[in-house]
Image (spheres, rainbow, N blue to C red):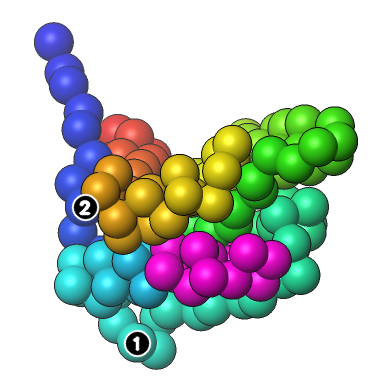
Amino acid sequence: MTEYEGRGDGSGRSVAIVASRFNDVVTERLLDGARGVLLERGVGEAALTVVHVPGAWELPGAAAHLAASGRYDAIVAIGCVIRGETPHFDYVAGEAARGLNRVALDHGVPVGFGLLTTDTAEQALARAGGDVGNKGAEAAEAALEMADLFRQLESR
């Protein structure tokens, strides 16, 4: 039996972060967490690209463009959608998540999912470096692990 498991080593990897500016009090913290993990795990400054988009809705489009370029081993998507009084949350959060998944499947490039979908700003802040950790950092870790796993499976 053969088993595979990705490692979170970023050495020699090229990674892009796509970060939403909407809810920037939260997304800047998520971005800092993702960037910190990537640099700590060996992704070089020159191999790290950060792309800012207006909101979560635009994350999949930018991620697709980056994935299609063939220049990145992984992409990390950072955003925050907080439920409001209208169904806008459901459309934006659901379609952004679906679009990011489609990017990963269509292009074979891992997409770390750092898109928070919360009921309150307090919940979002707790997940952006607060009591619940930093989901941007976790998304970066997952993206590196999957990039390594994909490389292992390709060389099989």
The residue that label 2 is drawn on is 8
> Which residue is pictured at 53% across the width and 70% down the height?
25
Q: Is residue 108 among the parts visible in the rendering? A: no
Instruction: Give SS at disc 2.
Output: loop
Dividing the picture into quadrants, the one containing residue 4 is top left
Location of the C terminus (image quadrant): top left
> Which residue is pictured at 18% across the width and 72% down the height?
40
The amino acid type, in three-letter code, at marker 1 is Glu
Name the spot of residue 117 as percent of width and height, x first: 58, 40
The residue that label 1 is drawn on is 45
Q: Earlier in the sequence, mark 2 or mark 1?
A: 2
Direction from residue 71 to residue 59 in the image, left or right: right
Direction from residue 97 to residue 90 in the image, left or right: right
Compared to 130, does 21 lie above or below?
A: below
| View extreme (top): residue | 1
Dividing the picture into quadrants, the one containing residue 61 is bottom right
| View extreme (bottom): residue | 46
Give the camera-side residue of 154 and 22. 22
Range of residues picked out in magenta: 12-31
